Amino acid sequence: MTRSLANMSLSPEHPSITGPSDPEVDPRASYALEPDMVEALTDRIIATSGRTVPSYTPITGQPVANIPQSTQADVAEAYDRARRAQAAWARTSLDHRQSVLLRLHDLVLDRQEEIIDLVCWETGKARKHAYDEVLHVALTARYYGRTAHRHLDPERRPGVVPGLTRIDVNHVPKGVVGIIAPWNYPFTLAVCDGLPALLAGNAVVTKPDAQTMLTGLLGAQLLEEAGFPRELWNVVAGPGRELGTPMIERSDYVCFTGSTATGKIIAAQCAEQLIGCSLELGGKNPVLVLRDADVDRAAEGAVRASFSNSGQLCVSTERLFVADQVYDRFVERFVARTEAMRLRNGLGWDNDMGTLISQDQLDTVTAHVEDAVDKGARVLAGGRARPDLGRFYYEPTILEGVTPDMTCFGEETFGPVISVYRFHDEADAVSRANEGEYGLNASIYSRDTARARQLASQIKCGTVNVNEAFAATFASIDSPMGGMRQSGMGRRQGAEGVHRYTESQSVATQRLLRFAPVLGMSDEMYAKVMTANLRLMKKLGRA
Ligand code: NAD
């Protein structure tokens, strides 16, 4: 186990931390350079190309690891291994699979420091945001560990002839599930979608994002330590556009999390193979603060909704609609809370927001803010890159006066930038919240929770949180999660999250009566008897 780095900070108190080429930026090099740990993790990649690609921490720019790259033949090998392992795994009892999941729950909590360190190191996010990943994996493991029989036991359903037709519905595993994961929540998004797949008796081949491979591999290591056979969870590494197609061609189902543009490519390829997929994609998520909202609570929630993981969170908000009656009070408190955030680029708990992950992300955020400001938007807080904190660091930023001609009005920024809008009536707020192509997550702040729930039903988003930013739905694992419209297809979590990895198989057992004329009855007489029977069944209230 690696030692915790939580007390090591790259805050402004460490003025030597200025950029990637600074040779002084090395107080945690022991972490990045612990060769045993890196080797144990990268050994898990099925890769024979002999090529490696270096990855770097966004915190300092130091190299993290050289990642062996998989070939298309390695992808084929990963699927062969998975298929063999799946055949044996599908024969294990549900009780056994449950117990492994519950062991994983404990293991993840016990090893949280190590997980959090690695997540922070690879992504640059604040420690508390990395902890959210630990929490989510533990919650998901416990949920599916405890509800396995509810979701997966064969179900009895009413047959066509009461008492004589018995229907059993079996939940049969699909086989091998391909999981393609992004970099923003690399522990939970690499692991959580796979847990119900394994529970249902499937095997997994997964490709974590190139920037966060080690975290995905640590997830694989923990799964094995919990008791999942090693070949049940196979990891390949390389560019998505090269490995995606051979993965999809061999998968029985694909679970993808990432951008809408890539999601459409994946969906088209899955259609070609006639296999199902779930797509968890982008968002431009709205928050509504109604006139009767608890303004302090809404301001606190808005900070988390906007700036968790520097806004690089699929369910974080980029649009804030505030009722006229509370607009000034709310904005004043939201700005004050934002300006009070502790900005650090390091691994300690004393950090409210970390760095963006890459130059690409910084370029997008900078371009969106510059475009908005050039066209007349006002910066209420932030609005600057912070190279003094880290080369990809950008301040939490609040914009006012954003108009439809500005890029950040409708496009996903995926960064710490939020636009605040005033509204006069709720119907108008709902219709503005529903503008655009996305429909992932929304929040409504109001003291009248019944009214808020009623408004929620009018919002075209897959999840709506009342008086909370996003965590209430995200952490309630029984609640299905996913996007409407361009934000995705299918749902993770809950019954939907596990049933997507199964085929429903109906087994009918028929007693006595046959579905054909008997005792010399003519077809015409049979039709009359059946018609009378149908009428009777409806009168008796049968479904
Ligand atoms: P991305 O689509 O570029 O990459 C995601 C993954 O897909 C990576 O592993 C990448 O290697 C792979 N990939 C890229 N091209 C591929 C191809 N042609 N075939 C197969 N795989 C391919 O997304 P990103 O920029 O890394 O992630 C940010 C986006 O993800 C944002 O839009 C964000 O909203 C979205 N996201 C959504 C959720 C959700 O649950 N809805 C969660 C996290 C991120």
Image (spheres, rainbow, N blue to C red):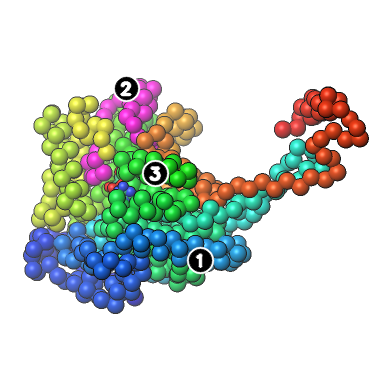
Among the 4 quarters of the image, the one containing residue 390: bottom left
Q: Are marks 1 and 2 in contact (CB under 8 Å)?
A: no
Q: Are marks 1 and 3 in contact (CB under 8 Å)?
A: no
Viewer-proximal residue, 526 or 411? 526
- Is residue 95 within the magenta segment? no
Percent coordinates x, y for residue 165 in the rendering: 78, 43
State the residue lying farthest toward the bottom.
36
Q: Mark 1: which amino acid?
A: Ala
Residue drawn at (42%, 36%) of the image: 484
Q: Mark 3: which amino acid?
A: Gln
Q: Are marks 2 and 3 in contact (CB under 8 Å)?
A: no
Q: Looking at the image, tell me whether mark 2 or mark 3 is earlier in sequence order.
A: 3
Residue indicated by mark 1: 85
- Residue bounds of the magenta highlight: 413-441
Does dot 2 land on a helix, a strand or a loop? loop
In the image, is 507 to the left or to the right of 403?
A: right
**Disc 1 from disc 3: Cα separation:** 25 Å
Which quadrant is home to the C terminus?
top right
Give the mark toward the camera: 1 or 3: 3
Residue indicated by mark 3: 269
**Disc 1 from disc 2: Cα separation:** 59 Å
Does dot 1 land on a helix, a strand or a loop? helix
Viewer-proximal residue, 525 or 142? 525
Viewer-proximal residue, 410 or 78? 78
Residue indicated by mark 2: 424
**Disc 2 from disc 3: Cα separation:** 45 Å
Q: Using a 10 Å C-alpha cutoff, classify the residue at mark 3 as few (fewer than 14 neighbours), some (14 to 19) or many (20 or more).
A: some
Percent coordinates x, y for residue 231 in the rendering: 45, 67
